[in-house]
Amino acid sequence: MWPMKRKEQETRNRSVQPPRVLLPSAVSEKMPMRSGRPPVPLRGAREAHDAVTLARLLRGTITPLRGDEVLALLEPHRPRLVPKPVNPLGAMLGQPQGRLLEALLRPTAPIILDVLLPRLRDHLIDRVVHNKGAAEDGLPGALEVATALRALVALLRGAGRGAILSVVSAIEADARADADRLVRGEAPVAGAEDDAAGVAGGATAGAMDSLAHALLRFEARRLMLETLGATVALRDVVYQSRRLTRHALRRAAEAMDGFGADRGIKALHASLATLASVDGLLVVALRNLDDQEEHREEANAFVEPADRKAMNDCLSAAWRLSDTLFDLVGKAANGGDLDELLFEALLRQLRSLHQFCTDLDHAGRPAVLDTLERRLAERSRALAGIAGERLVGILLARPADPAKARRLLARGQSLAQLLYDMGQDGDELEALALRLVVARDALNHTAA
């Protein structure tokens, strides 16, 4: 007996294969490691489609055929323990619409409350807070889903309102955290969405575009909260949006004033990066002007509203920056020593300032913008005249200085392009263009 047990044990041990040890080469060849976590799919996509359809069906005329459509729509979402509902409308012909609707909602309410509404809550949080599903085709709009959610809760006479409150709380908390992070100028959290790419504050490249994109997200939050009827949370999100707008204008003013005070390469980069994002700056300015119109009651004769002060400070900084730019460009157009790349950077800022003044179309547009726009055009035309006269003077001087003439010719061409971009195609541009043509022919003849 004992030898047989020992033999069975040896046979059993031989049948068990020893664990295989994978070498590093085998791991790298047969089991490639993933660089990151797989993307989390959007929750409740099917429920969002069906909820929008269900809200549309329940808004129409309730008939037995419409009841069959509702039950067929909800059947895939019915939990196993919930008995299959039966259409009660067949025996209620001629009854008022209110009674028909109540009779239809009675067997379907558990499915709507326990399945549809929680999934709609998760779906809206994923889309509005986590910014998922933007690239998926066939999805109903987030506002359309929110409208369906609110309509279903209203049809259930307030039952399931916790789903709406959860979405509202998530949006409000996300807006507050987003505004705090952007105002503090912190870098985005690793793995954040594309809208938070780049440094949120400061005068780095793309910072103004990032702030403008964040403001557009605040607009989406406002529309969502208005659709859900969350007035208290809406006021908080509006406050956070105004706070972020003022922060963006202050950052722009600091960048422009920094170059006027320092005139160093670092300050130039900050000012150039701010004005290079002129579209983002326009979004911020338009949001600020909208805020001023919506909160006019805050203004009085003794205290300047914060929104208006932020805009006035930014425009004052732009005015001072234009003085600095024209001072440096004027010296360069008159033959002063200046690096060509720096000269082009100064002209690019003048072009961006003019574009900002021209494209800011709003009913509450400050009058100083019109003055600044005219001033930019007038001083640019004056610079073009100075550059043309100085170029002719260099060509007629004896002894001639071809190197300096070529440098002034290149700067004159850049000024002519600036006038053209500003829409100043009058006599000054024609006179400068004629002098540039004559100077180019003279220099080519001299070189030959």
Image (cartoon, grey):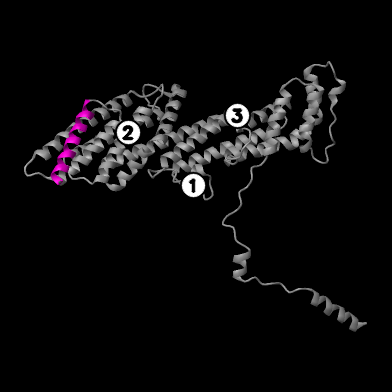
Please, which residue is most extreme toward the bottom here?
A: 3
Relative to 14, say whether 369 is above or below. Answer: above
Q: CA distance from mark 2 to mark 3?
A: 39 Å
> 25 or 98: which is nearer to us?
25
Q: Which of 205 and 312 lies nearest the eye of the viewer?
A: 205
Identify residue type, mark 1: Pro
| Sequence-first tag of 1 and 2 | 1
Q: Amino acid at mark 3?
A: Ala
Q: Position of residue 337 (x, y in %)?
A: 18, 45
**Residue 287 drawn at (x, y percent):** 45, 30
For label 1, the residue is 188
Pointer 1: residues within 10 angstroms few (<14), some, or many (20+)?
some
Coordinates of residue 378 in the picture (x, y in percent): 24, 27
Which residue has dot 3 on it? 230
At label 2, which amino acid type do we have? Answer: Leu
Mark 2 highlights which residue? 353
Q: What residue is rendered at 58% in x and 30% in y?
A: 225
Residue 26 can be seen, yes or no: yes
Vertical order, 326 against 103 (above or below): below
Q: Is residue 435 magenta?
A: yes
